Amino acid sequence: MVTPAPLTPEIFPYKLCSEIEMLISMDHNNIVNIYEYYLYRDQVFMVMEYLEGGELLNVIQNNPELLSENNIRKIMSDILSAVAYMHSKNIGSFYATFGNLECTAI
């Protein structure tokens, strides 16, 4: 069994940079674009596409009337389309919750 090396404070920013490089390579309508990133000391700064609308969780909590069957179908279709795209690129897992999904329009 192979045990991954722990992410020490010295290694973490560089591991994160490799994850960001992978995300930069994504080209899908339902995945936010990351244009550039900068590593400064132990911090990573990203220049990302601006998405008007905010987090999906906030949209749902603040506008429960938007949770019609048709809207839920559209939201799930968009999420699953992005997941299928990532799987087609051999990216098997990512952290997706309603708190880190962005909403542009419902």
Image (cartoon, rainbow, N blue to C red):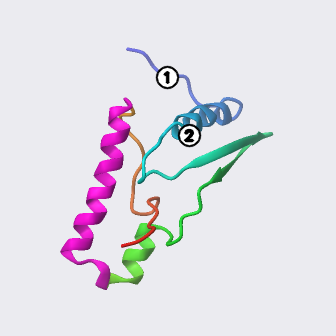
Q: Amino acid at mark 2?
A: Ile
The x and y percentages for residue 22 are 52, 34
Judge whether 49 appears above or below 95 on screen.
below
Judge whether 4 appears above or below 42 on screen.
above
Instruction: Tell which of 58 and 26 is nearer to you.
Output: 26
Instruction: Tell which of 73 and 3 is nearer to you.
Output: 73
Q: In the figure, residue 38 lies in which quadrant?
A: top right
The answer to whether residue 77 is left or right of residue 50 is left
The x and y percentages for residue 103 are 44, 67
Q: Residue at x 66, y 29 (%)?
A: 11
Say if residue 75 shows up in the picture. yes
How far apart in space, not on screen, are marks 1 and 2 (Cα)? 24 Å
Which residue is situated farthest in the top direction here? Answer: 1
Q: In the figure, residue 87 lies in which quadrant?
A: top left
Part of the protein shown in magenta: 65-90
The residue at which mark 1 appears reads as 4
The answer to whether residue 59 is left or right of residue 17 is left
Q: Of the numbered discs in the image, which one, if any, rests on residue 24?
A: 2
Q: Which is closer to the viewer, label 1 or label 2?
A: 2
Mark 2, Cα crowd under 10 Å, few <14 / some 14-19 / many 20+, is some
